[in-house]
Image (cartoon, grey):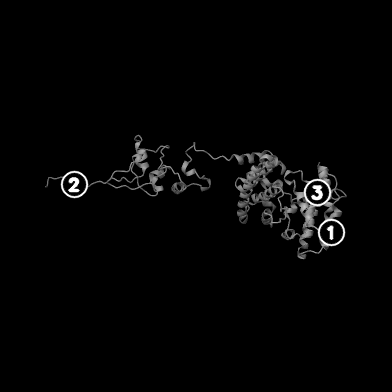
Amino acid sequence: MSGMQPLRRAHRKSRDGCKNCKRRRVKCGEEKPACMNCINFSIHCDFSTGGHVAGSSSGPSEPSTMDTTAPRKRGRPRKEWTSPEATPTSTSTENDVRSTTLSSTPTDLGTLSPTAATTGPSDPTAPAPLNVADIELLHHYTTTTWRGLGPQPLWQTEVISIGIPHPYVLHFILAFSALHLAHLNPSKRRHYSILADQHFSSGLQKVTLVLPNANEENAQALYVSALMVCYCTFANGPNRGDFLVFSERGKTVWLPLLGGVKSIMETFGPAVIFHGPLAHMDVSGDESTYESTATKEKWPTLEWEQPFDALRELVETTPLQDPALRDAYLRSLANLRACFEATFGRASDGTYTGKPEDSVIFSWLYKLEEDFVQGLQAREPVALVVVVYFALLMKIYEGRWYLRGWVEHIMTRVQAGLGEELREWIRWPVEMCEVVGRADD
């Protein structure tokens, strides 16, 4: 007995390693949800999908589809090592892969595409997504559409630069471009209108979420967005029951956004909004005497002062459904008069006394008060008459494609809603619209 050798302790070899380690013939640490070998080489570990089934420690291992391949030497796994068991094929599997990979690798989540974790940055042959429709819209905007908005390079390229870190701006730009293409291509109008709706809705959803968190970093983007929402609203054309500043179905979609941006301007001031790329957009300035737009452009004179004096008297004396709104109507009329004076000038010398911003006719929309809009929604006749005078101002600029159709649409609706007596008060702007229309022809 003393000459007998001591019994050797039995060694039970584990066969529970992952398939990648088995194929590489290296020891698997069997860590869950993914072994460290797979994590270190950034490859998919079948532990993470629950695909690994532990076998008996003493029984034979389950055959795999990869067992039929030629034996590999130990070392770094090859890129082409994928198998039905190791390749994610479902949404749940892709989520498992991302959770495993990202937990071990510091990565900016904002830069990941839905396929980044499965294809990996080391695979240059992976297909890259390309949205040709959006590229077409952006190309059309930068070559054509921007010309109807303002000076180069502000509207051609710089607003796009503003939109890169603030995608809602880009959505509105692409929506406006799609509406322009719909205008130019009647046979494809439905196609481009759908694209415009999609981008406008996306932009509106995103910017509505950002507005409550306005700050100096996004103030410019929000301001440009408000302008683009206005342009898109014009370009979309008049719809039944929609009259730009009021609607038969409640408030218009874009006015609340305009009010939010007005609040931003009051909070941060022109110094924050109008600097850098938007410096040329600054029309603020002291009240002084300036040359009118009509004088600069050599337009025919328009005798507008007497009709406005009469309109003010009407607003001051006409009984109202809600007398508390009279002051709001008078302020809106005063703002509109300032726009008319900056556009046509005084009859005496063609100049106007006011601020440079008065020469921007859409500044009247920007300054609209909630009480005035409330009167329009209530179909207050006096407020409707004021809107017709604004429609005349729009008629002057109807050569711009995105304004066409609005003037007649608004005037037809207002005329139908006024009694015979008040229709006399819109005779002058209606007649002037016809004169301006003939001059354009």
Q: Tell me the SS state at disc 3.
A: helix
Q: Tell me the SS state at disc 1.
A: helix
Q: Which class describes the residues within 10 Å of circle 1: few (<14), some (14-19), or many (20+)?
A: few
Are discs 1 and 3 less than 8 Å apart at CB? no
Are discs 2 and 3 less than 8 Å apart at CB? no
- Identify the residue shown where x is 62% and y is 47%: 198
Q: Which residue is mark 2?
A: 7
- Identify the residue shown where x is 82% and y is 62%: 316
Q: Position of residue 200 (x, y in %)?
A: 64, 48
Number of labels in the image equals 3
Q: Which class describes the residues within 10 Å of circle 3: few (<14), some (14-19), or many (20+)?
A: many
Q: What amino acid type should be assigned to the residue bearing mark 2?
A: Leu
How far apart are the two marked residues, 2 and 3, measured between alpha carbons?
108 Å
Find residue 314 and report its image quarter.
Answer: bottom right
**Which of disc 3 and disc 2 is earlier in sequence?**
2
Specify whether residue 167 is in view.
yes
Q: What amino acid type should be assigned to the residue bearing mark 3?
A: Thr
Which residue is at the front of the view, 76 or 100?
100
Q: Which residue is mark 1?
A: 421
Q: What amino acid type should be assigned to the residue bearing mark 1?
A: Glu
Q: Position of residue 434 (x, y in %)?
A: 83, 47
**Which of disc 3 and disc 1 is earlier in sequence?**
3
Q: Position of residue 261 (x, y in %)?
A: 67, 54
How far apart are the two marked residues, 2 and 1, measured between alpha carbons?
119 Å
Instruction: Specify whether 95 is left or right of 340.
Output: left
Instruction: Specify whether 180 is left or right of 3.
Output: right
Which residue is at the front of the view, 259 or 236?
236
Dot label at residue 343: 3
**Which of disc 1 and disc 2 is earlier in sequence?**
2
Residue at the extreme top: 70
